[in-house]
Amino acid sequence: MSLRWWTVIGLFVAGLTGTLLWLIVTHTKPTQLTQPVFLSLLGITLAGLTIPPAAYLNRRFARSGWLKQDPYRLLRQGAEVGLFVTVCGWLQKEDFLTWTLAAIITSVLVLMEAFFLTRSDR
């Protein structure tokens, strides 16, 4: 799949889930059911919004042929951003989030991505 398709798919997913997120925020009251739905939609929306900048940065800075070697790199990087936002949102909701914990979560995700990038460049 080309970078343009990844960008179109990412923006489509972000638009669809962003619309659902807006509907939940404006038309429902916070309950035990809507809180995880809100966090999930927030993560998916930001994952979709992350794909176009990730596509640009990978096209600009990655080695040539990276898309054939690692075809799901953009999806993985978007999912990591969505996971980070979802986990931090849940921790904030439970009143456990601190700067230190956010830095630890960021470090784990950055190290995980560094592992995947170094393993796929063979």
Image (tube, rainbow, N blue to C red):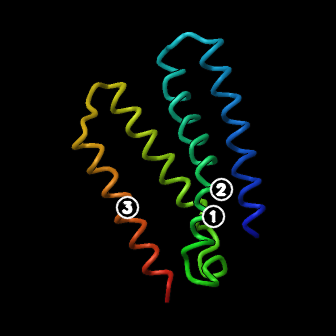
In the image, residue 43 lies at what x, y percent? 53, 40
Using the image, determine if residue 3 lies above or below residue 13. Answer: below
Farthest residue toward the bottom? 122
CA distance separating discs 1 and 2: 6 Å
- For mark 2, does the 10 Å Cα neighbourhood hold few (<14), some (14 to 19), or many (20 or more) residues? many
Q: Nearer the viewer, residue 50 or 16?
A: 50
Task: Please tell me which residue is depicted at 25% across the width and 39% down the height of the picture.
Answer: 99
In the image, residue 38 lies at what x, y percent? 54, 27
Using the image, determine if residue 93 lies above or below residue 111. Answer: above
- In which quarter of the view is residue 86 placed? top left
Using the image, determine if residue 60 lies above or below residue 76. Answer: below
Nearer to us: label 1 or label 3: 1
Secondary structure of the residue carrying tag 1 is helix
| Residue 56, numbered label | 1
Q: Amino acid at mark 2?
A: Pro
Quadrant the N terminus occupies: bottom right
Residue pointed to by mark 3? 110
Labelled pair 1, 2 in contact (Cβ < 8 Å)? yes
Task: Please tell me which residue is depicted at 50% across the width and 84% down the height of the picture.
Answer: 121
Q: Nearer the viewer, residue 32 or 100?
A: 100
Secondary structure of the residue carrying tag 2 is helix
Q: Nearer the viewer, residue 3 or 68?
A: 3
Q: In the rendered structure, which disc, 3 or 2, sits on the residue that comes first in sequence?
A: 2
How many numbered circles does the render carry? 3
Q: Nearer the viewer, residue 84 or 60?
A: 60
Labelled pair 3, 2 in contact (Cβ < 8 Å)? no
Q: Amino acid at mark 3?
A: Val
- For mark 1, does the 10 Å Cα neighbourhood hold few (<14), some (14 to 19), or many (20 or more) residues? few
Q: In the rendered structure, which disc, 1 or 3, sits on the residue that comes first in sequence?
A: 1
